[in-house]
Amino acid sequence: MNKKASFLGYDLVIWLMRMIILIGMIIIFLMFEGLMFKTNVHVREGEAILMMQSMMTNPNGFSYTSDGRTYPGIIDMERFNPEFLNKSMNLDLDYKNDVHLHDQLRDHWAYHLTLYNSSKKLDEIYYNRYWFEKWRIRANTGLLGSGAAMLLTQDYVVMLRYPDRTETGFLKLEVARPSK
């Protein structure tokens, strides 16, 4: 057998193996790049959690406040009403001059707070009830896309502070919003 022919055959096999390894590395690199590259960052759930936490910790809201300190786990029953909650979330502002801002708030947020003691439901508060009911139904369908909605629910064990007594209660906080 010719030495030159065997050398060319051996050289061809080595280069073929090198090309296969190179192509494999390029494919793996493109797969990792595709995994790491995101075109959409979904922050809706984070915004909803932030809204829930601001409801619980805002000194102008329904949490008990004494000497300038807010106690997020204690609900002042005199302040658990829509007026205090809207004030704490800046939803009671006069929007006569800025109707567009009021429409943005109304079209992007809806919440439902339900307060229970150990035996019964005590009170509930809605903001934007009409859209909350619609978005709750859409969120439970599991559909995706621009017509979908998300519903985030959190339950808290809280203390209910009345003027004359304190008792244990539960707060169910639901925030619904569209996915657009």
Image (cartoon, helix red, strand yellow):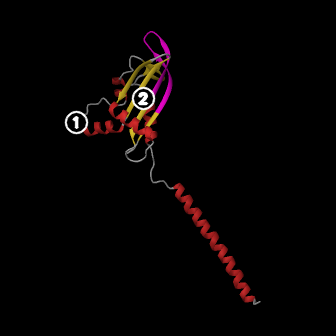
Q: Is residue 13 visible?
A: yes
Q: Amino acid at mark 1?
A: Asn
- Gap in Å between the C-alphas at discs 1 and 2? 26 Å
Residue 68 is left or right of residue 97, and the answer is right
Looking at the image, which residue is at 28% across and 36% down? 102
Q: Which residue is rendered at x = 67% and y = 80% of the image?
A: 12
- Residue appearing at x 60%, y 69% in the figure: 23
| Residue 102 is a magenta residue | no
Residue 121: percent from the left, percent from the top?
Answer: 44, 19
57 vs 135: above or below: above
> In this view of the protein, which residue sits in the foreground, 169 or 137?
137
Q: Which residue lies under the disc numbered 2?
A: 55
The single residue placed furthest to the front in the displayed view is 141
Using the image, determine if residue 46 lies above or below residue 85.
below
Could you tell me residue 50's position as x and y percent? Answer: 44, 35
Report which quarter residue 10 is drawn in: bottom right
Q: Residues within 10 Å of mark 2 (few under 14, many from 20)?
A: many
Q: Secondary structure at mark 2?
A: helix
Q: Where is residue 56 drawn, in percent x and y?
A: 45, 27
Name, please, the residue furthest toward the bottom: 2
Q: Nearer the viewer, residue 138 or 96?
A: 138
Q: Residue at x 45, y 46 (%)?
A: 42
Q: Amino acid at mark 2?
A: Met
Image vertical order of residue 145 relative to residue 80, above or below? below
Residue 66 visible, this angle: no
Q: Which residue is mark 1?
A: 97
Q: Is residue 28 toward the left or the right of residue 119 in the image?
A: right
Q: Which residues are magenta?
A: 153-172
Quadrant showing the N terminus? bottom right
x and y, in percent, of residue 109 in the image? 36, 36
- Lower position in the chain sequence, tag 1 or tag 2: 2
